[in-house]
Image (tube, coloured by chain):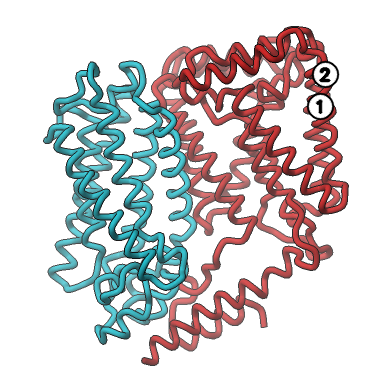
Amino acid sequence: MAGRSWLADVLAVIMIVTAVYCASRLVVAVAQRRATEHDVDLVHIVMGVAMAGMLVPRINPLWSSAWAVVFGAATAWFGWRAFRGYRLARPDRFARAHHVPHLVMSGAMVYMLSAASRPGSGAASPGIAMGASAAGGARFPLAALVLAIFMVGYVVWVGDRLPALAPVRAWVAAPAMAAAMATAAGLGAPGLHAAGPQVATSEEAPARSGAPLRAPVSPRLAACCEIVMGITMGYMLILML
Amino acid sequence: MSDTAVTESRAARLGLPYRATATWEAPDTRRVLQLSLAGLWLLDAILQYQSFMFTRAFGQMLAASAAGNPAVVARPITWAARLVEQHGSPLNTTFATVQLLLALGIAWRPTLKAALAASIAWSLSVWWLGEGLGGVLTGSVSPVSGAPGAVILYALLAVLLWPADRAQEPAPFVAARAVGARASRALWLVLWASLAYFSLLPASRSGQGLHNRISGMAAGEPGWLAAADKNAAALLAQHGLAASVALAVVLVVIAAGVYLPAPAARAAIVLAVVVAAAIWVFGEALGTIFTGSGTDPDSGPLLALLALAYWPARAQAPARAQAPARARRTAQTVRRAAQIRGQ
């Protein structure tokens, strides 16, 4: 890849750790019957492994075309979730847009995989990917810049809203309050997603469904995963220029 | 009752950890600008992690900024550049990580003040040791090529967006909230008037001065950006003096704009944003980000961000008057939560 190899190694380790953590979130959610955003965590697992493989090609377990199919499916899924959010959610712009960042991140993965595996770059095999810039730049570099700027904006947006996410003990004490604050901050509330039939983050959903609000699996750490992945993806996109 | 008091009392009734859940407020205009500043720092950090910055060429680039400066300024630059050449990897990692921490510190509210203060100190040191004071003492700088240096604008923004309010006077725009209207207008005037002065320096106003600066930016850029630069340069060929004078007049108008009534001030701010965008695209080639050797997005986005901080507030709605609206929003959120809890 075009960046420093030790830096790529470090970022790859961080991505693997993030993926493992997201896998543990799913396990904890099932074992303790706590809420989490299953689709987001699942995509983070796959994304962490894929990004680690792009940064350090020798640990890439799949072909780039296979990854592209996986993230194409993820893009379609989050596109559907975002569309439903806009159609069904209450007029809360942040709640409606809750899945848009995941949509863009999945789309960015498709872009990176396809731009890096263009003909002649020798990138169609496992162990590609970020070499595109070394080979003379990716296709559509402006798209890479726009996506990188989006990642930067998303990271600071999540960072700003991090204090609004109550720690788990606050959820245990007063879940409705914690959920309302998280919803007001536009970060979503995993407990609500799991408990209610509504899309996005309507705080009325659990009340309607009658399901009790459970403390979700650490919303703050979930947001930290978003930050780490956003920074790493921004770095990878800049390398594509 | 203040917004904080409303929130705190309701949160206390609900038995919640107040700090954890009830103090978050939706970002106001100043906070949005602070977050934009954090975003620029983050982009800086990511660019600083690029491969080029770990090479000796980065140190050589820093050393070049010493040229033309007085010895007292140039000597520390040369020393620092040599240090970076010799220990590029650890030093550049430190630089990039500091910028990353500044970005995250500004984005995370509990560390906002510390991060802004640190960013001022960092910016001033980089302005000297990394940018040679933006070349302002060399007599060969131009606003088109990024004078007075992008990094000093980070420091200026940190000062103007400092999270404090002067109690005595309502702020006519965001930049005035921390330092007051008079001081913030003076800072604006000094900045844009100095840009006008730089555009009239001999190196800028010579027949081919602007042409050479702009056409020189095309190398290594994608085709569309190189073509834009070359076309702009072709338009200015042999018209350096006229273009420099015209640019200086525009910059003076912008400098005086914040002293005008609100409608005219808004027009001046729009003009400032347009000029900043033109400088960024044609004079700075988007900070040469596409070449792999751009250390930051350059001064264009920062000038635009600065201009937005001077956008006149609506009449009868000074910054301090926004507090009750925010209080209502926060109180509504808390009330909704209480209703849900009661169901």
In front: A220, or B302?
B302
On the image, the x and y values in percent for residue A199 come to 31, 69
Dot 2 and dot 1 residues touching (CB under 8 Å): yes
Residue type beneath disc 2:
Leu
Q: Residue furthest bottom?
A: B342
| Image point (79%, 22%), residue name | B198
- Residue plotted at (75% across, 58% down): B313
Where residue B297 sits in the image (x, y, percent)? 55, 31
- Which residue sits at x=29%, y=80%? A213
Parent chain of label 2 = B
Q: Are marks 2 and 1 on the same chain?
A: yes
Chain letter, red in picture? B
**Relative to the observer, which residue lies in front, B78 or A112?**
A112
Q: Which residue is mark 1?
A: B196
- The kind of residue tagged 1 is Ala
Above/below status of A122 relative to B125: above
The CA span between labels 2 and 1 is: 7 Å
Quarter of the image with the C terminus of chain B in it: bottom left
Q: Secondary structure at mark 2?
A: loop
Give above or below for A125 relative to B265.
above
Using residue A173 as the reference point, say whether residue B134 is left or right of it. Answer: right
Check disc 2 and report the residue beneath it: B200
What letter labels the chain drawn in cyan? A
Image location of residue A9, percent across then percent down: 26, 31
